[in-house]
């Protein structure tokens, strides 16, 4: 059904349907996946894309204009043929300048989209958007570059065509404009108008076909990504394997069929333009050659010679101009998807500077309190749930291990989101004496570190750190000269020996699937210790550190490792352990045991 809508409409949603829906009520903003832009909007976006490098583009166009003026002078015989070498040098300089400006504009555009992506609201980014952003930020950069080059080529060939036309108009053809020459020139002008009108009208059909192709490509991206992100599940379920194979084959078949139609239509139009140019040249050149031979000596030979050069040059430039228009129309689908996806990211961006930017007036004043237990809707219906049940927490501060008891499934992850202002809970949680919503959201992400077992629901990863080496994950991808050494953090977390014995050690990218759940959690603890060593972390929340541990000695040993690792942080970082094992008191006993061994009061 979806593919039928895309093939018949060119997109899944029409402009009217998309405009009827408020942007705030459309978090995925489907029109970014299968949407449309008008021609004016598309060129407006292109101009905005080129704005950061407009000076370089202007210089490139000025050089192209200089080259055009030189060859017009050569055609008019005002300058010698050797001046074409200077025109060629100007064109080469224009090409170099244009490509430099192109890189600058693309870098700015792609960086802006990536920054907008990272600033999107958490609930807005879904796994379905992942393949779209991936394709736009990587594969479609070449399509953007080709579109901008097509715009430049259209402009350059337009100048060439105008230059050839000026050379023709400046000729004094009085007495030389015989009826045969007049008819030939009229035929050429008619064919030129036909070429231009045909390319403009055909560009509308190509634009629609291009939009359909790009929408189908996006749908194919989604199918492929869905299959690859569930690879292990599919390998274990033959039914899933068969369904994914069938869906991909059907989608790709329709996609390739639409690509073929687009390619055939574009090739037919290009051949039409090519043969019209050949027909015009075959018609006009013999007429001028005959005119030069039979015309009055010294009167018509020069005008005929200029026209014999200017007309082929003008026709060739006009054909390339029309070809550029068709190429631009054929690539408009990629432009639309890039610009619409950028609009999606910008419309869904989270407010950054929206509150208090410091956590307390003094570092030692950091405290966390939940004055009373409350219930929070975390999805679905505010009336029917599901709900998170957050218990009360007395004012917690520095100097000791703080423990909150919560049953599993009661909403510990939701509480972590509340602390990061990723889930609203107005007037429910106090941070250093102020309601948490009074603080700036970005500041909270710097000051608060939450260790949780699973990624947030919008993450495409199945386990934390998936796809990154263990060294990159624990070290947060920053320079190794900053913060504590990663191996030291792994050692304090009690996981270094295990890590060094897996294939490739800290350089392993498969560590998240090799280690057990408690061991992966210890790796996350090592990451938290590394981040705390950078000095920005003021609150550390660990959710259910004992999940996956066997009851008895295994649980006691893991608890002791955690307390031992967290003990050095207690004087500088507020540490809160959310215990879901049913024995919160054991954490305090373990803390006392660690203090006794270290001789601390």
Image (tube, helix red, strand yellow):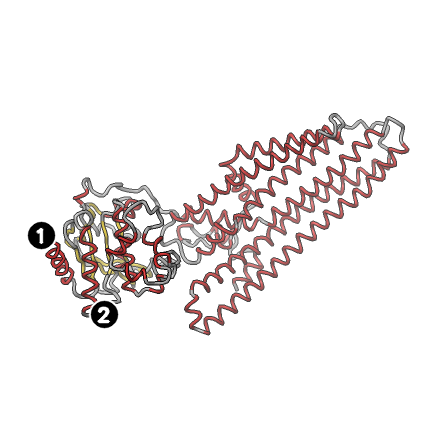
Q: Is residue 151 above or below residue 217?
A: above
- Identify which residue is drawn at 76% across, 37% down: 311
- Identify which residue is drawn at 76% across, 48% down: 275
Residue 334 tag number:
none
* Residue 525, image x, y percentages: 26, 56
* Residue 293, image x, y percentages: 89, 33
> For the residue carrying disc 2, how many other residues have a C-alpha within 10 Å: few (<14), some (14-19), or many (20+)?
few
Q: Is residue 216 above or below residue 353?
A: below
Q: Is residue 326 above or below residue 3?
A: above
Q: Is residue 418 visible?
A: no
Q: Is residue 403 left or right of residue 319?
A: left
- Identify which residue is drawn at 43% across, 62% down: 229
Which image quadrant for residue 254?
bottom right
Q: Secondary structure at mark 2?
A: loop
Q: Earlier in the sequence, mark 1 or mark 2?
A: 2
> For the residue carrying disc 1, how many other residues have a C-alpha within 10 Å: few (<14), some (14-19), or many (20+)?
few
Q: Which residue is mark 2?
A: 550
Label 1 and label 2: CA atoms lie apart by 31 Å
**Residue projecting furthest to the bottom:** 238
Taking depth in this image into account, of 177 and 16 the one nearest to the observer is 177
Taking depth in this image into account, of 337 and 459 the one nearest to the observer is 459
Q: Which residue is mark 1?
A: 601
* Residue 381, image x, y percentages: 32, 61
Q: Is residue 393 left or right of residue 129?
A: left
């Amino acid at each position: 059904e979806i593919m039928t809508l895309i093939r018949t409409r060119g997109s899944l949603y029409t402009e009217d349907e998309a405009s009827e829906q408020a942007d705030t009520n459309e978090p995925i903003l489907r029109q970014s996946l299968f949407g449309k832009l008008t021609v004016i909007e598309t060129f407006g976006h292109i101009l905005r894309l080129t704005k950061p490098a407009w000076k370089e583009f202007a210089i490139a166009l000025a050089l192209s204009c200089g080259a055009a003026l030189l060859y017009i002078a050569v055609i008019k015989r005002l300058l010698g043929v050797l001046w074409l070498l200077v025109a060629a040098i100007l064109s080469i300089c224009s090409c170099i300048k244009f490509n430099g400006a192109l890189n600058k504009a693309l870098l700015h555009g792609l960086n802006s989209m990536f920054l907008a992506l990272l600033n999107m609201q958490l609930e807005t980014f879904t796994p379905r958007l992942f393949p779209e952003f991936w394709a736009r930020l990587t594969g479609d950069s070449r399509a953007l570059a080709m579109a901008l080059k097509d715009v430049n080529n259209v402009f350059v060939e337009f100048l060439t065509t105008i230059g050839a036309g000026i050379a023709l108009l400046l000729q004094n053809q009085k007495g030389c404009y015989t009826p045969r020459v007049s008819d030939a020139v009229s035929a050429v002008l008619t064919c030129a108008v036909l070429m231009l009108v045909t390319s403009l009208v055909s560009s509308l059909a190509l634009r629609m076909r291009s939009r359909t192709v790009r929408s189908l490509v996006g749908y194919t991206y989604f199918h492929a990504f869905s299959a690859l992100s569930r690879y292990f599940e599919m390998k274990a379920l033959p039914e899933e394997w068969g369904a994914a194979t069938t869906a991909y084959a059907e989608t790709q078949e329709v996609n390739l069929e639409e690509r073929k139609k687009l390619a055939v239509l574009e090739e037919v139009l290009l051949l039409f333009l090519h043969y019209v140019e050949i027909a015009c040249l075959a018609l006009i050149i013999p007429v001028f050659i005959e005119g030069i031979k039979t015309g009055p000596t010294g009167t018509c030979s020069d005008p005929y010679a200029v026209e014999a050069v200017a007309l082929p040059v003008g026709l060739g430039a006009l054909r390339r101009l029309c070809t550029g228009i068709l190429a631009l129309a054929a690539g408009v689908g990629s432009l639309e998807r890039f610009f619409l996806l950028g609009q999606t990211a910008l419309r869904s961006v989270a407010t950054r500077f929206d509150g208090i930017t410091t956590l307390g007036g003094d570092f030692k004043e950091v405290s966390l309190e939940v004055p009373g237990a409350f219930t929070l809707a975390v999805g679905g219906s505010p009336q029917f749930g599901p709900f998170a049940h957050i218990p009360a927490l007395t004012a917690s501060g520095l100097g000791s291990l703080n423990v909150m008891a919560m049953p599993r499934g009661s909403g510990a992850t939701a509480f972590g989101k509340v602390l990061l202002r990723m889930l609203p809970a107005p007037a429910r949680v106090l941070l250093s004496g102020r309601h948490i919503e009074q603080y700036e959201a970005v500041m909270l992400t710097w000051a608060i570190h939450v260790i949780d077992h699973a990624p947030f629901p919008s993450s495409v990863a199945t386990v934390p750190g998936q796809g990154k080496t263990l060294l990159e994950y624990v070290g947060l991808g920053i320079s190794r000269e900053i913060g504590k050494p990663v191996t030291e953090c792994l050692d304090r977390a009690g996981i270094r020996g295990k890590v060094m014995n897996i294939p490739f050690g800290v350089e392993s990218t498969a560590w998240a699937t090799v280690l057990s759940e408690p061991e992966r959690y210890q790796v996350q603890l090592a990451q938290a210790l590394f981040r705390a060593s950078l000095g920005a972390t003021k609150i550390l929340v660990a959710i259910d550190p004992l999940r996956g541990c066997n009851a008895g000695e295994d649980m006691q040993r893991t608890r002791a490792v955690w307390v031992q690792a967290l003990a050095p942080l207690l004087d500088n970082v507020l540490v809160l352990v959310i215990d879901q094992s049913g024995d919160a008191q054991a954490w305090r006993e373990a803390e006392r045991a660690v203090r006794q061994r270290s001789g601390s009061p």
